[in-house]
Image: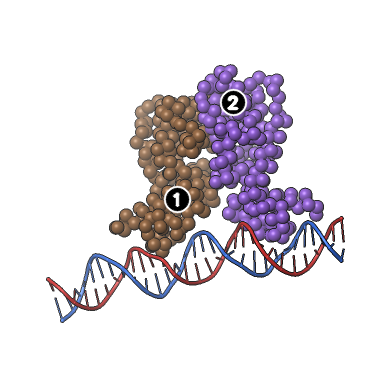
Chain colours: A purple, B brown, C red, D blue
Amino acid sequence: MSKIDKRDEIVRAALELIAENGFHGAPMAMIASRANVGAGTIYRYFENKDVLITELYRDIEENIMAALQEKYSVGEPFRERFLHLGTGLLHHFIHNPLVFRYLEQFHNSPYGVASRRDKILGTATSDCNVFRELFQLGITQQILKDLPLVILFALFFGPVLSVARDHILGFVELDEALIHHTIEACWDGIKR
Amino acid sequence: MSKIDKRDEIVRAALELIAENGFHGAPMAMIASRANVGAGTIYRYFENKDVLITELYRDIEENIMAALQEKYSVGEPFRERFLHLGTGLLHHFIHNPLVFRYLEQFHNSPYGVASRRDKILGTATSDCNVFRELFQLGITQQILKDLPLVILFALFFGPVLSVARDHILGFVELDEALIHHTIEACWDGIKR
DNA sequence: CGATTCGGAATGAACGTTCATTCCTTTTTA
DNA sequence: TAAAAAGGAATGAACGTTCATTCCGAATCG
């Protein structure tokens, strides 16, 4: 196995175990054995568990942003741009349940608070700047309600994360139509 | 200190520490010392940590439901009933940040999934049946969008929990007006 | 009524387990 | 064959839980 492959195996194993069992249900020894790697080997690639966790988080966020940029065209009217981004995000979560559960674990942990602060205050560069820019534009163009950005975020991300979780846990079966209705309902909530 | 007082002290200490540091940041020894009680004493009142955690959860839920029932009058029109319940819930979270953070910890843990399943499938008797009944009524009377209950729940609870968290973490200052605007935006999202 | 006994509540040191991390040996690579 | 990588047993810290002991107010006795 090449060096890159081994790192990938470790990351994949960590993603699976943490998504399924949480940080405390994913001991390093278990990650190592799931990755077919010695316990000590992980420490050749990651300084410690914290670093593994946060690097995995960064990987995931980059992927999501890349996936969203694809569906994104600046030419369209505002509402369509929002619907595209919204359905795109929800799709991504539904088709990558491990990623979604990992993000939930991360956000509901001490790690998550700092990251959240960055996101909201706009310090983060990588981060959900697509949404930040879009929402900001919507406010200044008086398309969206004149509420603090944080509130608009809540009105969008709140439901999206919630239905994604319900779908993944099997409490509801989201098909194409239901996804659209959900994002449109979010739109009704934030639009002026 | 009387027997009841001692139990209360333990519960209070557990609430504080778990709300602030999560389940894993609140070892029994720490809970005991914060409650001015010996480590072994806790086990005279609670069989083990799990029992302490779930009993505390039940206490909290009862309190919330009691607080919400107060503000609730079946005579009002549907929209007003919703707004009352919504603002009431948000108020309660904002004025009881420890309770809110405890609930978040609980829901984002293995404990939470079972409880969530009960809530959504309607097995739970104690639980947010006020909301369940109201939303069901709204659907059959064609006041609310004809979407699965789970989705409507997401469109309401999602934003409420999200803004409550942002307020408590200091990312936004929710005043009376902002609370109303938020709940009204939720209304826009779920109404037909 | 004061002294003594008694029982259960409280205690916290000790135990066994689990985990992240380290360290030294073995294997692979160049 | 020398250097780098991998392996996994060893380590020590932290945790939930237990249990032999202490403590204290009530009951009993002389």
Check chain identity for marks 2 and 1: say if they share one: no
Residue type for callout 2 = Phe
Horizontal side of A1 relative to B95 (left or right) equals right
Within 10 angstroms of label 2, few (less than 14), some, or many (20 or more) residues?
many
The residue sitting at the top extreme is A141
- The residue marked by circle 2 belongs to what chain? A
Q: In the rendered picture of this protein, how many numbered marks are placed on residues?
A: 2
Q: Residue at x 66, y 59 (%)?
A: A29
Horizontal side of B192 relative to B96 (left or right) equals right
- The residue marked by circle 1 belongs to what chain? B
Q: CA distance from mark 2 to mark 1?
A: 37 Å
Residue B127 coordinates in the image, percent (x, y): 44, 43
Q: Return the residue nearer the eye: B45 or A153.
A: A153
Q: Return the residue nearer the eye: B24 or A117.
A: A117
On-image quarter of the N terminus of chain A: bottom right
| Element class at badge 2 | helix
Q: Residue at x 43, y 44 (%)?
A: B98
Q: Which residue is mark 2?
A: A135
Where residue C7 sits, quadrant-wise, is bottom left
Q: Residue at x 60, y 22 (%)?
A: A137
Q: Which residue is mark 1?
A: B17
Residue B160 appears in the picture as rendered: no
Residue C20 coordinates in the image, percent (x, y): 61, 56
Horizontal side of C11 relative to A139 (left or right) equals left
The circle drawn on residue A33 is: none
Residue A68 appears in the picture as rendered: yes
Q: Return the residue nearer the eye: B192 or D22.
A: D22
Residue B54 coordinates in the image, percent (x, y): 45, 52
Residue type for callout 1 = Leu
